[in-house]
Amino acid sequence: MPGQIQDSALVSIPRPRESAFALGLRRILRTPSSRVALVVLATIVVVGLLAPFIAPYDPAAQPDIVGLKSLSPSLAHPFGTDPYSRDVLSRVIYGARLSLTIGLLATLVSLTLGVAYGAIAGYAGGVVDAAMMRVLDAFLAIPRLLLLLGILVEWPQLSIGALILFLGLTGWFGVSRIVRGQVLALKHAEFVTAAQALGASRRRILGRHLLPNLISPIVVAATVGVAHVIVLEAGLSYLGVGVPQPLASWGNIIYDGADQVADLWWMSLFPGLFMVLTVMTLNILGEALRDAYDRR
């Protein structure tokens, strides 16, 4: 029947193609460990974002430096108090927001520099590539932690913005090597040759053809980079050269009770637990992202 043919033709409309992001997310959610990691990480992020509404006390308040100092966990203070009578639970919650913010922003700086440097070196090739790689080798020869300690000891009163900048400026070397290798492998591909034959500029080839094909290694590097920066910032704060007091960071919470670890065990346990959970979930999601995009 003509009417039935027309109706069936209207019904058989092709579905829109699934985006790479949606496809990768769907494949990640198939794994139980990835689902659990995503839920845990989302919970920590939400807790950090809603810190002013969730935290029971002001993280910098010292209500009673004598009567409320170094209290063990109780109903009034579930994570106990520190030697300055500050509530550890409130400081851990605010520390989640600060640590995640530093990790994300510092990794963004690292990715921007690393992707740009590696893409230019790999696509230029020849003498330019060799010279840029020798400069990169010189940077890689300097241990990052020692470099940061030297900088932060020289300028101990850095702001959070300056700390993020220094963490980002010292963390792009590995990303640039990854991007350079991928660009070297792709720059002679057929789609790049076709774009060159059509008269596309180098900038257009890099921005429109090569970089979109590097999403997988860049996303994985970003996930692992955030975890690494969180641990590095906590280590620097534990050494007393990271986040300045009275701001709350997981590292300087542990530092406040470092001289009495046996007696003030809660000051190491709870911020350390939050940090371990965050780093573990980021690493699990990084592996899941790598597997999902590699299959694609």
Image (spheres, rainbow, N blue to C red):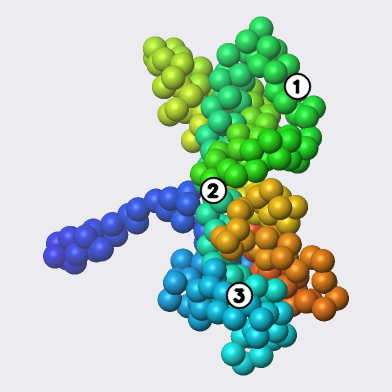
Q: Which residue is mark 1?
A: 138
Amino acid under disc 1: Ala
Give the Cα separation between the discs numbered 3 and 2.
21 Å
User: What secondary structure is marked by label 2?
Assistant: helix
In the rendered structure, find residue 49 and report the number of the disc placed on it: none
Disc number lying in front (2 or 1): 2
Indicate left or right for 258 with 221 as reference: right
Answer with the quarter of the image where residue 262 lies: bottom right
Q: Which residue matches tag 3?
A: 86
Q: CA distance from mark 1 to mark 3?
A: 44 Å
Residue 295 relative to residue 46: left or right: right
Pick whichever, 67 or 227, lies toward us: 67
Residue 224 lies, with reference to residue 256, above or below; the image says above
Mark nearer the N terminus (2 vs 1):
1
Please tell me which residue is depicted at 61% across the width and 85% down the height of the picture.
77
Residue 97 % position (x, y):
53, 62
* Type of amino acid under label 3: Arg
| Quarter occupied by residue 282 | bottom right
Is label 3 in contact with label 2 (beta carbons under 8 Å)? no
Q: Is residue 260 above or below residue 237?
A: below
Q: On the picture, is 62 further left or further right than 201?
A: right
Circles 2 and 1: CB atoms closer than 8 Å: no
| Quadrant position of residue 1 | bottom left
Residue 51 in the image: x percent, y percent? 48, 71
| Crowd rating for badge 3 (residues with CA inside 10 Å; few <14, some 14–19, many 20+) | many
In this view of the protein, which residue sits in the foreground, 172 or 185? 172
According to the picture, the residue beneath numbered tag 2 turns out to be 160
Q: Residues within 10 Å of mark 1 (few under 14, many from 20)?
A: few
Q: Give the amino acid type for the residue marked by disc 2 in the picture.
A: Ile
Mark 3 and mark 1 in contact (Cβ < 8 Å)?
Answer: no
In this rendering, the answer to whether 292 lies above or below 281 is above
